[in-house]
């Protein structure tokens, strides 16, 4: 591992680390040397991921952290700081979706998506950033989506939340630019996870996504690792406030 990508001695915290892209991000960071605080609501799933990361020779521990509750976020972050002493890298990743046309979209689903995907990132960042700012160094990576920039039918709440994530990223980056804390967003296209299983199982949607993507396919979760490591590492120290697309070319046209 080149030194500028080396995360040895760093502590990384990932929300929604129990499966999918959060699990992939956590494993990527561990492969680059970081120890991991794995956050979510399912202790057994978190322990499964933690065990695999410990097998890589890193420290890993699951923490109950529901991003919908400010109290729970602060308690979870306090437990992580007790355990690891600090958080150098935060990956805001926990997310949900619900796909329905605008006129039928239930208010409760709108509220859940915005509260998880947008307010959750804000609450967790508010809880984690102060100790980064005190030390004058930190990396925050927000999991956005191509849907922060492009629209698709049925995605009114999700696309709104991800557009919000891109803006949240810019404002946090600006406020902390001179204080050593870099904030960037990663914007994936469709990757094979639980969240998008309904689309994968629908041949029409599956083919639409393949045909719409210049590279002609979905992403594999492991393909996220390189970008997450880059944004967490010294290699990206002069980059902040950016949304970087990892989308097989979707947003080219
Ligand atoms: N897969 C894609 O194609 C794709 C594309 C673009 C962006 N993304 C983004 O990537 C992120 C992860 O998505 P994914 O595809 O990996 O989804 P996933 O497989 O469904 O995983 C979602 C994760 O979020 C956690 N989570 C949900 N609500 C939570 C809450 N209230 N508090 C704490 N954790 C919560 C889940 O943990 P529990 O076990 O607690 O439910 C789970 O670990 C999301 O932000 C999503 O928008 C995904």
Image: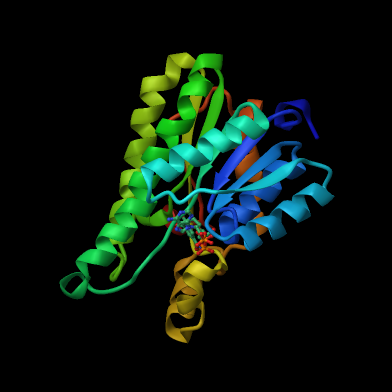
Image height of 22 relative to 81, above or below? below
Q: Residue furthest bottom?
A: 203
Image height of 143 relative to 178, above or below? below
Along the viewing direction, whichever of 219 and 100 lies nearer the viewer: 100
Q: Residue 110: horizontal and vertical position, in percent?
A: 26, 61
The answer to which quarter of the image holds residue 14 is: top right
Image height of 149 relative to 243, above or below? below
Give me the residue at 48% from left, 70% from top.
196
Q: Quadrant of the C terminus?
A: bottom left
For residue 96, say whether it is visible: yes
Q: Quadrant of the N terminus?
A: top right
Q: Residue 201: horizontal and vertical position, in percent?
A: 50, 83
Give me the residue at 51% from left, 15% from top.
134
Q: Residue 50: horizontal and vertical position, in percent?
A: 71, 52
Image height of 221 relative to 168, above or below? below
For residue 156, say whether it is visible: no
Along the viewing direction, whichever of 80 and 223 lies nearer the viewer: 80
Q: Residue 72: horizontal and vertical position, in percent?
A: 44, 45
Instruction: Answer with left or right where residue 99 lies relative to residue 229.
Output: left
Instruction: Answer with left or right where residue 54 lies relative to residue 27.
Output: right
């Amino acid at each position: 591992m080149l030194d500028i990508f080396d995360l040895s001695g760093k502590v990384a915290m990932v929300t929604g680390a129990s499966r999918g892209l959060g699990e992939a991000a956590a494993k990527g960071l561990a492969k680059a040397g970081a120890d991991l605080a794995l956050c979510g609501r399912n202790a057994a799933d978190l322990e499964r991921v933690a065990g695999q990361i410990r097998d890589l020779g890193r420290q890993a521990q699951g923490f109950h952290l529901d991003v919908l509750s400010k109290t729970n976020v602060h308690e979870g972050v306090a437990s992580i700081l007790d355990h690891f002493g600090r958080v150098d890298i935060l990956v805001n990743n926990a997310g949900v979706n619900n796909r329905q046309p605008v006129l039928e979209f239930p208010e409760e689903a709108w509220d859940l998506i915005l509260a998880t995907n947008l307010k959750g990132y804000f609450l967790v960042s508010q809880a984690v950033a102060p100790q980064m700012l005190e030390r004058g160094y930190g990396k925050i990576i927000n999991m956005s989506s191509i849907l922060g920039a492009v629209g698709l039918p049925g995605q009114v709440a999700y696309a709104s939340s991800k557009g919000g994530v891109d803006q949240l990223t810019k404002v946090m980056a600006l406020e902390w630019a001179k204080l050593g804390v870099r904030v960037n967003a990663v914007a994936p296209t469709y990757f094979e996870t639980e969240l998008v299983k309904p689309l994968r199982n629908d041949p029409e949607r599956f083919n639409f996504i393949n045909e719409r993507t210049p590279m002609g396919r979905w992403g594999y979760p492991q393909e996220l690792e390189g970008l997450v490591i880059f944004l967490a590492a010294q290699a990206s120290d002069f980059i902040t406030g950016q949304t970087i697309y990892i989308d097989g070319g979707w947003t080219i046209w």
